[in-house]
Image: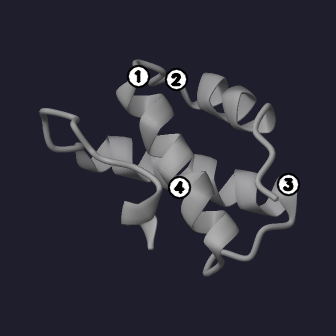
């Protein structure tokens, strides 16, 4: 489960537009990395994406670039 990968200390609830953007980034990253969306790799990708967002990376292109540097084996 995703809870194995991350904790979520983000103090404010995510806004709908933030969720939409995170979903787009997740979808693109899954396609580019050849990751099935309902896999453990996808859970790790999602957890990493949320951690990047929580760390202050809120730009869609910056998130995509950061995810390209991560190996989701």
Q: Earlier in the sequence, mark 4 or mark 1?
A: 4
Q: Are marks 3 and 4 in contact (CB under 8 Å)?
A: no
**Labelled disc at residue 23:** none
Label 1 sits on residue: 55
Horizontal side of 43 relative to 34 (left or right) equals left
Image quarter for residue 35? bottom right
Label 2 sits on residue: 59
- Compute the Cα span from label 1 to label 2: 12 Å
Tell me the mark number nearer the camera, choosing from 1 and 2. Answer: 1
Q: Position of residue 23 (x, y in %)?
A: 51, 56
Q: Position of residue 29 (x, y in %)?
A: 73, 51
Residue at the front extreme, as displayed: 4
Per the image, label 2 sits on a secondary structure element best described as loop
Tell me the mark number nearer the camera, choosing from 1 and 3. Answer: 1
Tell me the mark number nearer the camera, choosing from 3 and 4. Answer: 4
- Compute the Cα span from label 2 to label 3: 19 Å
Per the image, label 1 sits on a secondary structure element best described as loop
**Labelled disc at residue 46:** 4
Q: Earlier in the sequence, mark 2 or mark 3?
A: 3
Mark 3 Cα shell of 10 Å, populated few (<14), some (14-19), many (≥20): few
Q: Nearer the viewer, residue 41 or 61?
A: 41
Up/down of 71 relative to 35, above or below: above
């Amino acid at each position: 489960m995703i809870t194995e990968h991350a904790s979520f200390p983000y103090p404010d609830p995510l806004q709908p537009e933030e969720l939409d953007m995170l979903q787009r980034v997740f979808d693109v990253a899954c396609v580019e990395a050849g990751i099935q969306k309902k896999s453990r790799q996808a859970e790790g990708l999602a957890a990493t994406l949320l951690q990047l967002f929580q760390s202050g990376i809120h730009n869609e292109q910056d998130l995509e670039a950061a995810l390209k540097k991560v190996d989701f084996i």
